[in-house]
Image (spheres, rainbow, N blue to C red):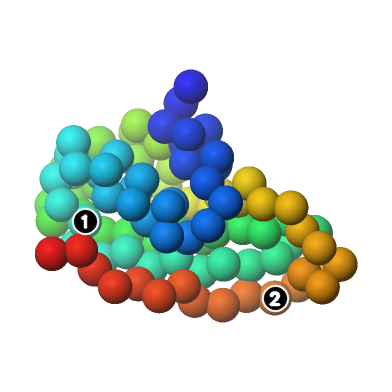
C-alpha cells in the first residue's frame, strides 16, 4: 500500500495528523501543518498544507507521496474514510485545529 493510500484510510483529522507526523518523521520534523476539511460532491476531504525544516526534506516527502507544492507549501487533498450523512450534504469547509507537536 502506498503512503498516500494509507493516509486516505483515516476518518478524522486527529488520526490523520498523527499519521502524518509519523510518516514525515523519517524525513525530518514538520514545522507547520494546517488541515482544512471540506465537503466536495458528498465526500469529506482533508486539504493538507505542510512545511518541513528543510527544502530537501520536503522534496523527499513530495516524491514519496507523489504530491506537489503550492504557495511554498507541500499541499495535497485526501478523501477521508467517513460516511456522509444527509446533514453533511453540500459544500462546506472549516480549518481543523492545527496545534503543533513539540
Task: Identify the image quadrant of residue 41.
Answer: bottom right
Q: Residue furthest right?
A: 86
- Decide if residue 92 is in sight here: yes
Residue beneath the point at 70% across and 65% down: 39
In the picture of the structure, the residue carrying the numbered disc 2 is 92
Separation of disc 2 and disc 1 at Cα? 27 Å
How far across and down, in percent of the image, does residue 63 sit? 34, 33
How far across and down, in percent of the image, does residue 92 sit? 70, 76
Under circle 2, the secondary element is strand
Residue beneath the point at 45% across and 66% down: 35
In the picture of the structure, the residue carrying the numbered disc 1 is 30
Q: Which mark is residue 55?
A: none
- Relative horizontal placement of residue 96, taking residue 23 as reference (left or right): right
How would you rate the neighbour count of disc 2 (Cα within 10 Å): few for under 14, some for 14-19, many for 20 or more?
Answer: few
Seen in the picture, residue 22 relative to 101 is either above or below; the reply is above
Quadrant where the C terminus lies?
bottom left
Q: Nearer the viewer, residue 62 or 23?
A: 23
Q: Nearer the viewer, residue 15 or 34?
A: 15
- Decide if residue 75 is in sight here: no
How far across and down, in percent of the image, does residue 9 sit? 55, 40
Task: Identify the image quadrant of residue 89.
Answer: bottom right
Q: Nearer the viewer, residue 34 or 87?
A: 87
- Relative horizontal placement of residue 59, taking residue 14 as reference (left or right): left
Residue beneath the point at 18% across and 36% down: 26
How far across and down, in percent of the image, does residue 48 sit? 44, 59
Q: Earlier in the sequence, mark 2 or mark 1?
A: 1
How would you rate the neighbour count of disc 1 (Cα within 10 Å): few for under 14, some for 14-19, many for 20 or more?
Answer: many
Seen in the picture, residue 13 relative to 58 is either above or below; the reply is below
- Relative horizontal placement of residue 93, taking residue 34 as reference (left or right): right
Q: Residue furthest top?
A: 1
Amino acid at each position: 500500500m502506498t503512503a498516500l493510500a494509507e493516509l486516505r484510510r483515516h476518518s478524522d483529522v486527529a488520526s490523520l495528523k498523527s499519521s502524518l507526523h509519523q510518516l514525515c518523521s523519517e524525513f525530518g520534523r514538520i514545522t507547520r501543518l494546517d488541515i482544512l476539511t471540506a465537503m466536495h460532491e458528498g465526500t469529506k476531504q482533508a486539504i493538507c498544507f505542510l512545511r518541513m525544516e528543510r527544502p530537501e526534506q520536503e522534496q523527499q516527502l513530495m516524491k514519496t507521496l507523489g504530491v506537489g507544492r503550492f504557495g511554498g507549501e507541500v499541499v495535497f487533498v485526501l478523501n477521508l474514510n467517513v460516511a456522509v450523512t444527509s446533514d453533511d450534504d453540500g459544500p462546506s469547509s472549516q480549518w481543523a485545529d492545527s496545534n503543533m507537536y513539540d
